[in-house]
Amino acid sequence: MADDMRVTVVGLGYVGLPLAIALARSFETWGLDVDTGRIAELREGHDRTGEIEPERLAASSLHLTTDPAACPPADFYIVTVPTPVDADNRPDLSIVMAATRTVGAMLRPGHRSIVVYESTVYPGVTEDLCGPELERISGLACGTDFFLGYSPERINPGDREHTVDRITKVVSGQNPDVLDAVAALYERVTTGGVFRAASIKAAEAAKVIENAQRDINIAFVNEITKIFARMDLSVWDVLAAAGTKWNFLKFEPGLVGGHCIGVDPYYLAHRATELGCDPRIILAGRGTNDGMAQWMARSVHDWHGKGAGRVLVLGLAFKQDVPDLRNSKVADLIAAFRDLGHRVDVHDPLVSTEEARHEYGLDLVVDPAGPYDLIVLAVPHRELVEDFDRFAALGTTDGGIADIKNALAPTGQTAAGRRIWTM
């Protein structure tokens, strides 16, 4: 692949920014995002997602803009925008279709660009929805004037081992020549190599089942957690024993949120339903996991046995050691405690107070002040666990500690001698 190729990445969030930075090492790369605040921060060397260090950002040759007209014609357009679900858990393709219209207006006759989607979708979206919309906006013919590709994103926020420049990248293309071109592009990005999917639809399907599989496995562990609780058995003790078998799958119970595992199964279920199939296992897993916050709140409330009181919830992000708030089920946990009559304060040192207010209407407490009847370690950020004695000291003398992910036990902390609940 020629070094003078030009690439435009549309969407500079958790997925798009690391990809654009990696591409910029080899090609002239433009990063386009509609969020003016995001672009301003990146230009100042700050990545609010924490995925790219200020030094790497400052050293990159990546061009940043909010204006599509500022981007010169590109050989590749890569779409990395979010694909959430709506209030009824139906796929919301509005963002990816808006990005498609933006790219359609950027396509130029005679340039024969390749448009690659990384956004998670159900099989058929790239070719059946995005392709025709690109044609409509550009006035060009798909498969003649421009071409389609799909390469599912595999970013795991906060993971410094499985980064975009190290993982195996699944690639696909509209025809063999496009597949070769897409493969060559991503081979310049990652040392993990590429896997050539049989078709665009196969690549789309691979992405949704990767996360649906994890969701179902976690749902199984969440279900047995509830069963063992009726037997006064700690699921952590059970998992420790079962995990000694060589082929036991080591999944843990907990809240399942975020932009992938808590969302992607609904995309597959939606398409299955359209085709007349009943995705019972997929939706059963989703139902189990979506109900865990309410079960946890009720279990902790009953265990504490002192009625409603003051509760301090530590952690709001959807997973530990990241600031990502998207689809965090901790918000459901907070709502469940409030429904039980508790007054809840929330503290998370990694999360933006403005984003917490915007996403969930929650005002974070920067410096919690006790006394609290219950302290709930919902997200075991390293910073919270290492300093937990300070938070435990905010509890009442007869108060309790709820350790959702069993994070305190491995550290040997006794939480200032207070009672500790875990699953």
Image: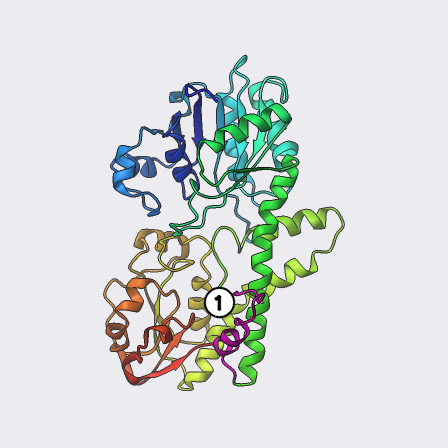
Residue 242 shown in magenta: yes
| Label 1 residue SS | loop
Percent of width and height locating residue 372: 30, 77
Kind of residue sitting beneath label 1: Gly
The magenta segment is 233-253
The residue shown at (56%, 53%) is 211
* Vertical comparison of 370 with 306: above or below: above
State the image coordinates of residue 36 (x, y, percent, origin top left).
Answer: 34, 35
Along the line of sight, which residue is nearer the eye, 294 or 59? 59
In-front residue for pair 81/358: 81
Q: Quadrant of residue 395?
A: bottom left
Residue 225 sits in which quadrant?
A: bottom right
* Secondary structure character of the magenta stretch overall: loop
Question: Looking at this rendering, what residue extends furthest in the right direction?
Answer: 276
- In the image, is residue 118 part of the stretch drawn in magenta? no
Q: Which residue is denoted by mark 1 in the rendering?
A: 254
| Residue 152 percent location from the top left of the image | 54, 41
Q: Residue at x 36, y 63 (%)?
A: 315
Q: Position of residue 187 (x, y in %)?
A: 48, 33
Number of numbered markers: 1
Q: Is residue 336 visible?
A: yes
